[in-house]
Image (cartoon, rainbow, N blue to C red):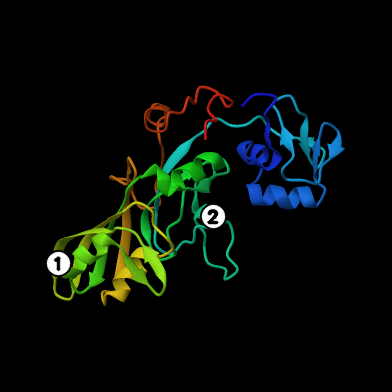
Amino acid sequence: MTEKEGERIAKRLSRAGVCSRREAERWIADGRVWVNGKKISEPGTLVTDTCDIRVDRKPIAEPQATRLWRYHKPAGLICSNNDPRGRPTVFERLPKHLPRVMSVGRLDFDSEGLLLLTNDGGIARRLELPETGWVRRYRVRMFGTPTEKEIALLAKGITVEGMKYGSIEAAIDSAKGRNAWVTVTLREGKNREIRKVFEHLGYPVNRLIRTAYGPFQLGQLGRGGVEEVPRRTLKDQLGLDTSNAHRGRQA
């Protein structure tokens, strides 16, 4: 980022770990954000590294270096900062030593497995984009066993209740009694996509575990466990230089 270009104030607040971009927009509307001694009212206001930025008259911290964590989400947690229904959230269960983080995509309440967490909203959005082409892989247990014809249909894409889903790769791992374990691979992942698609085919999903998100694997990470991705890996996989806060922002 050059001083001439600047960046949106909401993004800067998010990068500094102060709040999310949505929260920043609310704070700006409430008159809580000041830049160079002036109260601002537009979330699109551009700021540079030389600007004096304050929230409630207090200066914000410098932007943090990009960090990424692997988290083994248990079933029974929602990927939200708060839930109107009062269900427990992922963020309530994270270790207290973690900084403020956000999830890369989501896993629904009943799903479990690998969830990536980051302190960088720009990186989160970048990793969520279908254009990255990153594979999401799941182990799925369902009632019944899909046929070869149905698996071929999924590979071509399928429309369910007016929603078009892209190619889904499915491979039967095992079948015992009424249940089958299936490895499912996709590159986008719309809301509850796997559950909706297999329900449509007549195979209700009763367990769903994400095992991989792009190059990042669940591996042997225990349920509820959190492990930071090494900086070297971030550099190799994302092209990030995390040696300092400013150079690490390339999203």
In the displayed structure image, the side of residue 29 where residue 211 appears, left or right: left
Check the image and report above or below for 182 versus 6.
Answer: below
Q: Secondary structure at mark 2?
A: helix
Asked if the residues shown at circle 1 and circle 2 are in contact, with their CB atoms under 8 angstroms apart, the answer is no
CA gap between label 1 and label 2 equals 42 Å
Residue found at x 49% / y 26%: 242
Can residue 214 be seen in the rendering of this structure?
A: yes
- Judge the density around disc 1: few (<14), some (14-19), many (≥20) Cα neighbours within 10 Å: few
Q: Can you tell which mark lies on residue 135?
A: none
Quarter assignment of residue 204: bottom left
Residue 118: x, y in percent? Answer: 50, 41
Q: Secondary structure at mark 1?
A: helix
In the displayed structure image, the side of residue 29 where residue 17 appears, left or right: left
Can residue 204 be seen in the rendering of this structure?
A: no
- Tell me how many marks there are: 2
In the rendered image, which residue does mark 1 sit on?
Answer: 148
The amino acid type found where label 1 is placed reads: Glu
In the displayed orientation, state which residue is furthest to the top: 243
Q: Quadrant of the N terminus?
A: top right
Residue found at x 38% / y 53%: 188
Q: Nearer the viewer, mark 1 or mark 2?
A: 1
Residue found at x 40% / y 75%: 161
Q: Can you tell which mark lies on residue 92?
A: 2
In the displayed orientation, state which residue is furthest to the right: 38
Residue 101: x, y in percent? Answer: 54, 44
Instruction: Specify which label sits upstream in the sequence, 1 or 2.
Output: 2
Residue 168: x, y in percent? Answer: 28, 59
